């Protein structure tokens, strides 16, 4: 996991201390040095690149957790509400969620949502609307997020990822409309691997079919061999929920390192982040009963997610209320007797009740506190995102410069992707 600055921006530091910390953070914690841009980067004096020295706007980030207690339905429902609010606030009735975000990261079923909402179809628009994506997850989420004793996942989806191939065809990471980051865990190298649009457009060896990406990030029962489009890069992938169930820190690190596409983004103050959870599961176990593999996976995943949320909240400091929004629910606080009997309806109603729960905010050195509801938080950030979109119309310099397809033999130093075994066939 990327190192996250734990400075409290609300503390009374003098100007010199603040400047020193900023330099250390930029140069060492996030691995880039503004004083030595390479030939492909935008060369701008450091003084001109500091926050507040210019008007370039904030990079808008959408992060989507793995399955959780709702197997992706809470995040998908949140996206439906968020898209509706964005349309209402912007006055654009047919706007898509991808119109309002610069970067999307998703793990497990969250990665599938990211792929559906940000992969370009033949008409130039994303393949799925938010409503369509919700329907897909309601029907298939539980198959993508759970261990299966009977090999149900393999029978339904097969090793070739039939459902995903039918959905995405030959579309690949290069066919995404914005920056996309989807993790899995590579058993070959024993490290997380991030499928990244930025890497795909720079190196042929790192472009993967989107159907294979979705299989890799959701494979919970076994490792799947995942091969790049040109068959040069091979990994042995298991679910991204093991590596980065909450992929928010990965997205932030990628942006702060990627000066080619985000040339003026230097600190978390230059970000506007919406992080979507999928519900904390109730994993209570009576006596000495051993939790199932599925329960253990969810416990590990949600523990990681919560830890990432706490660290990121600390990094944002005072600006967390305006720059960082986390949507999460807790199944343990839901009255299950009030849910309908039908499985699909049950999960949808569970997600809606979680959205009406109090929003729980991680506070630096103060544990957590409850604010208004999750729905209120979504509405608040929809308003901020639309304001940011309008501000960009007055910007002189670009906030985001997405790279187009090029051919390169080596990765850029800001790559978010873990290098894996590459072979020539």
Image (cartoon, grey):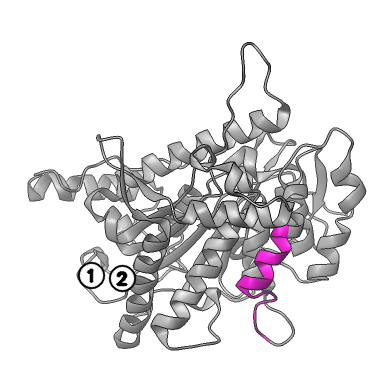
Left or right: where does residue 92 sit relative to residue 110? Answer: left
Which segment did they paint magenta? Answer: 124-138
Mark 2 vs mark 1, CA separation in Å:
7 Å
What SS does tag 2 mark? loop
Percent across and percent down for residue 408 are: 65, 65
Q: Where, by quadrant of the figure, is residue 391 drawn?
A: bottom left
Residue located 21% across and 43% down the image:
8
Residue located 84% across and 65% down the image:
165
> From this viewpoint, is residue 265 visible?
yes
> Residue farthest to the top?
288
What SS does tag 1 mark? helix
Report if residue 133 lies within the magenta region: yes
Report if residue 166 lies within the magenta region: no
Residue located 34% across and 69% down the image:
58
Percent across and percent down for residue 330 are: 50, 42
Tag 1 residue: 48
Percent across and percent down for residue 263 are: 39, 68
Q: Do the CB atoms of the residues marked 2 and 1 lie less than 8 Å apart?
A: yes
The quadrant in which the C terminus is found is: bottom right
Q: Main secondary structure of the magenta part?
A: helix
Q: Determine which of the numbered discs, if any, sits on residue 44 in the image.
A: 2
């Amino acid at each position: 996991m990327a190192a996250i600055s734990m400075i409290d921006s609300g503390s009374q530091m003098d100007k010199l201390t603040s400047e020193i910390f900023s330099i250390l953070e930029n140069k060492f914690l996030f691995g880039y040095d503004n004083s030595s841009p390479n030939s492909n980067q935008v060369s701008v004096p450091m003084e001109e690149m500091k926050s507040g020295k210019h008007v370039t706007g904030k990079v808008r980030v959408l992060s989507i957790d793995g399955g959780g207690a709702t197997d992706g339905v809470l995040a998908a429902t949140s996206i439906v509400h968020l898209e509706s609010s964005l349309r209402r606030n912007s006055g654009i009735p047919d706007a898509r969620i991808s119109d309002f975000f610069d970067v999307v990261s998703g793990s497990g079923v969250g990665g599938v949502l990211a792929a559906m909402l940000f992969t370009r179809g033949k008409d130039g628009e994303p393949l799925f609307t938010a409503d369509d994506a919700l329907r897909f997850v309601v029907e298939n989420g539980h198959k993508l997020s759970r261990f299966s004793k009977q090999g149900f996942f393999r029978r339904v989806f097969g090793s070739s990822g039939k459902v995903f191939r039918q959905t995405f065809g030959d579309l690949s990471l290069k066919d995404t409309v914005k920056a996309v980051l989807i993790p899995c865990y590579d058993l070959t190298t024993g490290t997380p691997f991030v499928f990244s649009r930025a890497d795909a457009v720079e190196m042929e060896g790192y472009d993967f079919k989107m159907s294979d990406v979705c299989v890799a990030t959701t494979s919970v029962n076994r490792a799947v061999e995942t091969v790049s489009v040109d068959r040069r890069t091979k990994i042995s992938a298991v679910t991204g929920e093991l590596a980065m169930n909450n992929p928010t820190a990965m997205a932030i690190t990628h942006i702060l390192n990627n000066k080619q596409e985000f040339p003026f983004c230097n600190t978390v103050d230059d970000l506007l982040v919406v992080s979507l959870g999928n519900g904390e599961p109730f994993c209570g176990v009576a006596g000495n009963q051993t939790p199932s593999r599925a329960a253990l996976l969810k416990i590990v995943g949600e523990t990681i997610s919560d830890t990432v949320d706490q660290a990121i909240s600390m990094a944002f400091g005072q600006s967390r209320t305006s720059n960082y929004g986390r949507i999460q629910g807790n199944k343990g606080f839901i009255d299950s007797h009030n849910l309908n009997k039908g499985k699909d309806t049950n999960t949808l109603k569970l997600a809606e009740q979680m959205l009406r729960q109090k929003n729980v905010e991680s506070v630096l050195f103060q544990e957590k506190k409850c604010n208004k509801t999750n729905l209120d938080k979504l509405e608040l950030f929809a308003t901020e995102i639309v304001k940011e979109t309008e501000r960009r119309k007055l910007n002189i310099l670009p906030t985001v410069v997405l790279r187009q397809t090029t051919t390169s033999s080596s990765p850029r130093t800001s790559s978010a992707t873990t290098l894996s075994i590459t072979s020539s066939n």
